[in-house]
Image: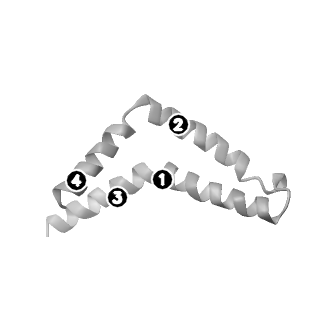
Amino acid sequence: MDKETEQYYDNLASIFLMQGWKDLIEELSANALHINSVEHAKDGDDLNFRKGQLNILAYILNLESTIDRLREDSSDVSNL
């Protein structure tokens, strides 16, 4: 892994340790349950808007585990 990528992962790891990150993830998780309800969609456009919101929420909610996997994969490749 190059130094720039390693620094990027380190910066994200330090963010993940902050209480603000944990609070944000908790709030977004609660919001995802509300957004995921199809019965609140007014029409097809609103449904598509909600799908977009859920895609973004999934990206943010899974960011920590995604970065962990990328680091592990990079480490496995480096050890070959």
Label 1 sits on what residue type?
Answer: Asn
The mark that comes first in sequence, 4 or 3, is 4
Q: Quadrant of residue 10?
A: top left
Which residue in the protein does label 4 denote? Answer: 6
Pick whichever, 2 or 79, lies toward us: 2
Which residue in the protein does label 3 denote? Answer: 69
The mark that comes first in sequence, 2 or 1, is 2
**Residue located at (38% from left, 40% from top):** 16
Label 2 sits on what residue type?
Answer: Leu
Q: CA distance from mark 3 to mark 1?
A: 11 Å
**Residue located at (59% from left, 59% from top):** 55
Which circle marks residue 62 in the picture?
1
Q: Quadrant of residue 39?
A: bottom right
Q: CA distance from mark 4 to mark 3?
A: 13 Å
In the rendered view, does 38 fall on the left or right side of 55? Answer: right
Q: Quadrant of residue 78?
A: bottom left
The answer to whether the residue labelled 4 contacts the one labelled 1, judged by CB atoms less than 8 Å apart, is no
Q: Nearer the viewer, mark 4 or mark 3?
A: 4
Q: SS of the residue at dot 3?
A: helix
Label 4 sits on what residue type?
Answer: Glu
Question: Height in image: 68 above or below 27?
Answer: below
The answer to whether the residue labelled 3 contacts the one labelled 1, judged by CB atoms less than 8 Å apart, is no
Crowding around mark 3 (Cα neighbors within 10 Å: few <14, some 14 to 19, many 20+) is few
Picture quarter with the C terminus: bottom left
The mark that comes first in sequence, 2 or 3, is 2
Q: CA distance from mark 4 to mark 2?
A: 24 Å
Q: Nearer the viewer, mark 2 or mark 1?
A: 2
Crowding around mark 2 (Cα neighbors within 10 Å: few <14, some 14 to 19, many 20+) is few
Task: Tell me residue 57's x, y (percent).
Answer: 57, 51
